[in-house]
Amino acid sequence: MHHITAVELKNWLDDTTLEAPKLLDVRESWELALCQIAGSEHIPMGNIPGDLARLDPDATYVVICHHGVRSYQVAGFLERQGFEKMINLDGGIAAWAEQVDPAMARY
């Protein structure tokens, strides 16, 4: 599994010469209602095993949660299911709010 910082992810998303990763937000619905990175697909952590068919095993995913712990667990689980291009957002949405989007709601 690879890791990426919030600033690195922002730069990647802004670089139109690169294929953008899919953003997989594994937080709960109430957390997503507070703040999110635009374009993220939402599948709560507990729903991941039952929703594998929704995911593309050939895609590159950056997995997002609040602080990076749940996303790390989900990325590891997906790797064990055969997904080869998993990236954990270090520090999660909290790091994104702090380093990239200071106007984003925090919790």
Image (cartoon, helix red, strand yellow):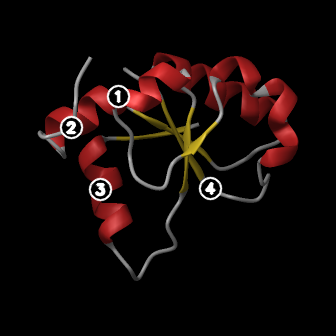
Q: Which residue is mark 4?
A: 60
Q: Amino acid at mark 2?
A: Met
Q: Amino acid at mark 3?
A: Lys
Q: What secondary structure is found at the residue carrying circle 1? A: helix
Residue 9: % across, % down: 35, 52
Q: What secondary structure is found at the residue carrying circle 3? A: helix
**Mark 1 in CB contact with mark 4 (< 8 angstroms):** no
Residue 83: % across, % down: 76, 44
- Residue at screen point 37% across, 63% down: 13
Instruction: Compare residues 56 and 29 and report the one nearer the observer.
Output: 29
Instruction: Compare residues 63 and 32 and report the one nearer the observer.
Output: 32
Residue 68: % across, % down: 43, 23
Q: Amino acid at mark 1?
A: Leu
Instruction: Compare residues 41 and 65 and report the one nearer the observer.
Output: 41
Q: Which residue is mark 1?
A: 34
**Mark 2 in CB contact with mark 3 (< 8 angstroms):** no
- How packed mark 1 is, by other alpha carbons closer than 10 Å (few <14, some 14-19, many 20 or more), is few
Q: Earlier in the sequence, mark 2 or mark 1?
A: 1
Which of the two marks, 2 or 3, is nearer to us in this view?
Answer: 2
